[in-house]
Image (cartoon, rainbow, N blue to C red):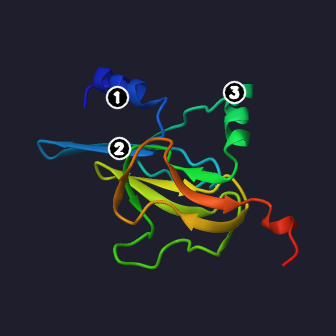
Amino acid sequence: MEIEKIKSILDAIKDTDIEEIWFEKGGEKSGFRRKDISSSASEPSGEIVFEAPKPHNKESIQKVLSSSNQIKSTMVGTFLRSATPGGKPLVEEGDFVTVGQKVGIVEAMKVMKEITSQISGKMIKVLVADNHPVEYGQPLFEVDTDYANKKH
């Protein structure tokens, strides 16, 4: 793949939530995967790895605080409740979820994007059925964030 084409692809997806993208043309495969900064250092994989900075500002923090009882889709695609077809859902109503916990997957054009919880609390409602289309920012789950403070 030509260097200019690689640069244009990286530039086109740098401000998106796409974590991985692969191309195949004439038997030649090329791929890109964002670097997972939470994982430990490993052997080089031969893949081109890049990391896009995600700055935090007052507006983005306020947006999270104003909708703190919902977990929303981070991209347009098909919502999947389990990690494998026909598998057990990652979370059920009544489960307790924690920050960073994987709660679903959104798939678009064979790109799988994990949906992780940005809040902790009791899962009170699943808003989207498995294998249904979702929009960017669409609420997927309702979470009772005061659950830990309530007497049970």
Rendered image: mark on residue 21? 2
What residue occupies the far left of the structure in this picture?
Answer: 26
What residue occupies the far top of the structure in this picture?
Answer: 4
Closest to the camera, between mark 2 and mark 3, is 3
What is the spatial separation of the Cα atoms under label 2 and label 3, in whole angstroms? 29 Å
The quadrant the N terminus occupies is top left
Q: What is the total number of numbered labels drawn onto the structure image?
A: 3
Q: Position of residue 45 (x, y in %)?
A: 44, 52
Give the SS element for disc 3: helix
Give the SS element for disc 1: helix
State the residue at coordinates (55%, 33%). Answer: 52
Rendered image: mark on residue 59? 3
Q: Position of residue 117 (x, y in %)?
A: 63, 56
Q: Quadrant of residue 132?
A: bottom left
Q: On screen, 135 above or below 95?
A: above
What is the spatial separation of the Cα atoms under label 3 and label 1, in whole angstroms? 28 Å
Closest to the camera, between mark 3 and mark 1, is 3
Q: Position of residue 75 (x, y in %)?
A: 44, 43
In the picture of the structure, the residue carrying the numbered disc 1 is 9
State the residue at coordinates (67%, 35%). Answer: 63
